Amino acid sequence: MAFEYAPAPESRSIVDIKPSYGLFIDGAFVDGRGSSFKTINPATEETLAEVAEASDADVDLAVRAARRAFRGWSRMSGRERAKYLFRIARIIQERGRELAVLESIDNGKPIKESRDVDVPVVAAHFFYYAGWADKLGYAGLGPDPQPLGVAGQVIPWNFPLLMLAWKVAPALACGNTVVLKPAETTPLTALLFAEICQQADLPPGVVNIVTGAGGTGQAVVAHPDVDKVAFTGSTEVGKAIARTVAGSDKKVTLELGGKAANIVFDDAPIDQAVEGIVGGIFFNQGHVCCAGSRLLVQESVAEEVLARLKRRMATLRVGDPLDKNTDIGAINSREQLDRIRELAGVGEAEGAERWAPACDLPSSGFWFPPTVFTGVTQAHRIAREEVFGPVLSVLTFRTPAEAVEKANNTPYGLSAGVWTEKGSRILHMASQLRAGVVWANTFNKFDPASPFGGYKESGYGREGGRQGLAAYLKGADL
């Protein structure tokens, strides 16, 4: 077939939201056999669309479609598969504004994050893995790497399109087919991605998207003809998935919760560190598994760092996600807002001091101001549990050894940050911190070529980079 580039029609509006959406199975949108649910704009609480909820029978249809498609897709040369991935990447760039606006409307995140971070990194993942599709034999994963089969993928609501790219791109590059279940509160960009698959003439059944709540995800994970399970979400659900697949031959990767320590030493560039602290916890309203939600500051500079941090927080703008000047958008759902409020209340009840800048919150929608707690100890729940919101806990330390001890005193192990001018200290801390990713003098920076994943209750397996290919190939292990 020809692969001429076909831009989206000029008459298409930036966001063409339909009143209802079906499931995407075997290359076409179909009506589900189950009920439907509403997806809403968290900034206004207005209903955006009615979305089909896939039944177990719908999931079975999707898996069977993926199995049929696997025969042809897996036998296709890597060079030919790469053409499809490259084309998907180009269409994502072409429709980037549309995707960014839809992501912000459905998720609540600021448009400048959707536009300048999410969508470009999504396209970059498809470009990156397209480059690997015909080079799998040179990836150090065996002389003749083979795909697993059908990949069942369940993604969260905090980065709907980005998590889709993290999972779909390497799966397709390796020759697998996909049944993907997006989060029930943020299904719209996944369904728009289904349109992109049609526009790219991706063979029917290679990508299937089934929408719904937890029951739909459970049906995908438990389906006997799914060979690979990839999940990003809460540790609680991740444990349930591990129990479900125990005893089977399914290959599994789990990217779960986190409680990252962002460690600031006395020789750190303070202004740069403050920007990293702000980005580490308030990016995407704190809805980030690797958010720097625990700030560990060396005692000698703690007062100065906190003063500068509060001044910087006072400049943050909370409001309309579609305003390009907004820094902090809406909390994704009423349920998540209640969770944040509960844990913030517990922090105060346990004796921590709460501070937030003065800001007028919109009267409708789900909102929470950027908040910092001081006087926090390792016994406080806000220092131990994942808040998953714009809430920062501040602790202090005196020595590097104490910083390491406090940073590692958590059931999680996803990420960490170190701020210092000493390269030797960075290397020492990175070797001591039990975290899958350690950033040095920066935070929340992602690249398709860099592997990402955690230890302990933050899950296992890696996504991104050459290591991300191993999760979708038989016998491959790194």
Image (cartoon, rainbow, N blue to C red):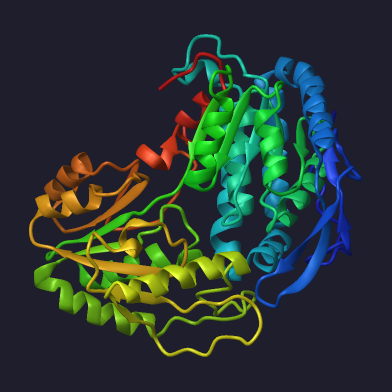
Q: Quadrant of residue 456?
A: top left
x, y (%) of residue 49?
82, 63
Residue nearest the observer in this picture, 175 or 459:
459
Decide if residue 78 is on the left or right side of residue 254. Answer: right
| In the rendered image, the vertical position of residue 91 relative to residue 107, given as above or below | above
Q: Which residue lies furthest to the top in this view?
A: 143
Residue 165 visible, this angle: yes
Decide if residue 18 is on the left or right side of residue 127. Answer: right
x, y (%) of residue 214?
67, 46
| In the rendered image, the vertical position of residue 445 relative to residue 167, given as above or below | below
Residue 127 visible, this angle: no
x, y (%) of residue 248?
58, 18
Q: Residue at x 63, y 41 (%)?
A: 154
How many numbered circles are shown?
0
Residue nearest the observer in this picture, 180 or 195:
180
Quadrant placement of the N terminus: top right
Decide if residue 354 is on the left or right side of residue 154. Answer: left
x, y (%) of residue 293?
35, 62
Decide if residue 104 is on the left or right side of residue 191. Answer: left
